[in-house]
């Protein structure tokens, strides 16, 4: 038996031998721990495996299993459903061991964690880092499974912008766009994707042709706050006067449609301006037989109506007067009879491009969310049209004086003290877009432009005409264009005929709300008669349903009315500009 004689070995050699023995024992211990942890993982005992692998993830120069232990720790956490824990460990591996030869496996699992948490853009960034060609098939399947769950085409559009060479995203986007009702399909985009990515028409296969569903009698439910219990026969205006006037116009329209051979039945339901009452109405089976639902007019009570519409595939317009696109975003069976705020703003930029003498502008907007949305949409569309926005400002009561100081600070005067020149030179800008119906804002803009006496085009809203405190002659003294979705010529034979019928029936002149109610039912009756009660699926985006009093209805891909007339005041009459 060999014996170590310390007297014959140098101290340095002895120390080396002892150190080597310790390291060998330590390495054997790490190997034993790793084998135990790996056995637990293989047996599916992921909780125990996490504990076993954890001690092996700590840095030690004698531990050769750090990277593997960290990876299997993350894998164990993922299989237990601890997705965030797994993701954090995988990110740590990428930071500590960027040159590890198993990094493609790490990235693949990390990609799955991002997809699971719907962090799609981060997931796609990681997929681009996987270089091993053996992962190609798995990555395709991963994308098909997760990205196909995305409902919003806009998210897919942004993904394709970031990853323009990704064929799988393009295929999923074509499939998603093609699944939408015919009226909502962006056919231009679908065709461009098919051409760019050399897709075949079979990508669109399986979409059944949609035919109009026509009925002898059209049934329209009006779920609105009639407040019947509070009504009395006195001539004073009622709390819900607008609703009553809309209803009177709608009723008159059913008579006109009947004379034209279109049978339409209005069924009125009083939701009493109450959410519980609204829910109760939609428990009635009778509502399932409706072809169109109108109401409940106020957004706070809209949720049960929109849910009912979605579940039963019945078209709904929550409020015929509303421009709020939030009412149509989540329900493909809802639509706006009016243009949305966004559509009005985009159309305003287009009228500026057409009528303004210079390709630059100012933008003023108020403190409401609607004003901010319109201003931002106008600026974006103006950029597309090569209109330069020189100044954009949010106006409150505190800073409203800056409008006058910016636009109408004179620098030169004539002998009668009339301003000749201003700090903002005459004719130096093409237009001013006012994204607000706040009189404080638009009156100051009008005052300033009138003082200047130059060629600036002021673009505003038809609501300005409802302000009785405004001197309308000032609108004639400046160049102005007002977005007027509800514009109607009061001297047209159609309007004069409507007014006569209304007076014969009710003994008074019709209000603007009665006119909107009449026009709404006239247009919807013609639309359902011609294109079926499933008109949202059968209409193409180019279709215009001609109005009787107004310019009619042409539904955009966003399901709002894209027809936006602009008017100006001339000789005391509103004149259409476009």
Image (spheres, rainbow, N blue to C red):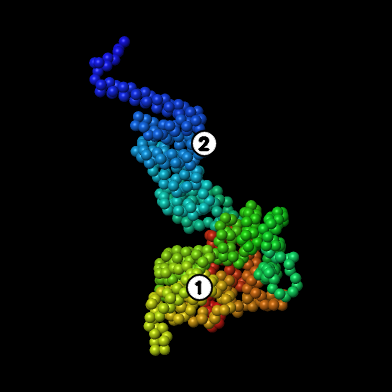
Q: Cα distance, mark 2 to mark 1?
A: 59 Å
For residue 363, above or below residue 332: below
Residue on which disc 1 sits: 441
Residue shown at 53%/56% (left/top)?
185
Q: Earlier in the sequence, mark 2 or mark 1?
A: 2
Q: Residue 54's spot in the image, x, y percent? A: 44, 33
In the foreground, 149 or 74: 74
Pointer 1 local density, CA inside 10 Å: few below 14, some 14–19, many at least 20:
many
Q: Is residue 106 left or right of residue 530?
A: left
Q: Residue 250's spot in the image, x, y percent? A: 67, 68
In the foreground, 128 or 44: 44
Residue shown at 58%/60% (left/top)?
327
Quadrant where the N terminus is found in the figure: top left
Residue on which disc 2 sits: 80
Quarter-of-image position of residue 516: bottom right
Which residue, as the protein is rendered here, is positioned at the far bottom?
Answer: 415
Would you say the residues marked 2 and 1 are in contact, meaning their CB atoms lie under 8 Å apart? no
Which residue, as the protein is rendered here, is positioned at the far top?
Answer: 1
Q: Residue 103's spot in the image, x, y percent? A: 38, 38
Residue 56 shows in this picture: yes
Q: Is residue 404 left or right of residue 25?
A: right
Q: Residue 512's spot in the image, x, y percent? A: 63, 73
Residue shown at 62%/77% (left/top)?
493
Q: Secondary structure at mark 1?
A: helix
> Residue 35 shows which numbered tag?
none
Quarter-of-image position of residue 571: bottom right
Pointer 2 local density, CA inside 10 Å: few below 14, some 14–19, many at least 20:
some
For residue 450, above or below residue 314: below
In the foreground, 232 or 22: 22
Q: Secondary structure at mark 2?
A: loop
């Amino acid at each position: 038996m060999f014996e170590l004689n310390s007297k014959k070995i140098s101290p340095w050699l002895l120390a080396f031998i002892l150190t080597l023995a310790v390291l060998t024992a330590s390495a054997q211990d790490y190997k034993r721990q790793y084998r135990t942890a790996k056995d637990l993982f293989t047996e599916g005992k992921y909780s125990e495996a996490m504990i076993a692998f954890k001690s092996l993830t700590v840095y030690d120069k004698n531990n050769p299993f750090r990277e593997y232990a960290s990876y299997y720790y993350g894998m164990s956490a993922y299989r237990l459903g601890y997705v965030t824990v797994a993701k954090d460990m995988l990110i740590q591996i990428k930071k500590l061991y960027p040159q590890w030869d198993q990094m493609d496996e790490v990235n693949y699992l990390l990609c799955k964690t991002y997809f699971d948490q719907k962090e799609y853009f981060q997931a796609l960034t990681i997929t681009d880092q996987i270089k091993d060609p053996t992962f190609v098939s798995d990555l395709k399947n991963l994308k098909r499974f997760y990205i196909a769950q995305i409902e919003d085409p806009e998210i897919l559009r942004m993904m394709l912008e970031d990853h323009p060479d990704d064929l799988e995203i393009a295929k999923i986007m074509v499939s998603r766009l093609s699944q939408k009702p015919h009226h909502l399909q962006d056919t231009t985009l679908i065709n461009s994707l098919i051409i760019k990515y050399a897709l075949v028409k079979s990508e669109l296969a399986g979409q059944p042709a949609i035919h109009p569903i026509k009925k002898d009698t059209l049934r329209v439910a009006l779920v609105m706050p009639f407040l019947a219990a509070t009504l009395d026969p006195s001539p004073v205006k009622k709390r819900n006067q607008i609703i009553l006037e809309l209803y009177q116009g709608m009723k008159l329209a059913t008579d006109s449609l009947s004379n034209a051979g279109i049978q339409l039945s209005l069924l009125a339901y009083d939701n009493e301006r109450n959410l519980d009452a609204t829910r109760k109405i939609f428990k009635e089976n009778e509502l399932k037989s409706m072809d169109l639902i109108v109401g409940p007019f106020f957004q706070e009570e809209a949720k049960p109506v929109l849910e009912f519409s979605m579940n039963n595939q019945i078209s709904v317009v929550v409020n015929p007067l509303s421009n709020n696109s939030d009412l149509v975003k989540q329900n493909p069976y809802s639509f706006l009879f009016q243009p949305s705020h966004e559509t009005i703003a985009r159309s305003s930029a287009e009228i500026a491009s057409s009528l303004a003498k210079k390709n630059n502008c100012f933008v003023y907007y108020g403190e409401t969310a609607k004003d901010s949305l319109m201003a931002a949409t106008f600026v974006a569309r103006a950029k597309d049209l090569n209109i330069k926005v020189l100044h954009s400002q949010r106006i409150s009561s505190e800073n409203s004086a800056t409008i006058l100081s910016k636009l109408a600070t004179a620098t030169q005067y004539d002998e009668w003290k009339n301003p000749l020149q201003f700090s903002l030179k005459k004719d130096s800008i093409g237009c001013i877009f006012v994204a607000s119906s706040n009189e404080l804002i638009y009156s100051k803009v009008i005052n300033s432009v009138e003082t200047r006496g130059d060629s600036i085009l002021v673009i505003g809203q038809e609501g300005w005409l409802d302000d009785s405190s405004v001197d309308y002659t000032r609108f004639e003294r400046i160049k102005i264009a007002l977005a007027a979705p509800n514009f109607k010529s009061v001297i047209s034979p159609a309007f004069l005929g409507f007014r006569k019928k209304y007076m014969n029936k009710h003994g008074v002149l019709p209000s603007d709300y009665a006119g909107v109610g009449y026009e709404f039912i006239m247009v919807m009756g013609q639309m359902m008669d011609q294109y079926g009660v499933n008109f949202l699926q059968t209409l193409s985006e180019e279709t215009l349903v001609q109005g009787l009093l107004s310019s009619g209805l042409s539904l955009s891909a966003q399901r709002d009315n894209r027809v936006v007339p602009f008017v100006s005041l001339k000789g005391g009459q509103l004149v259409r500009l476009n």
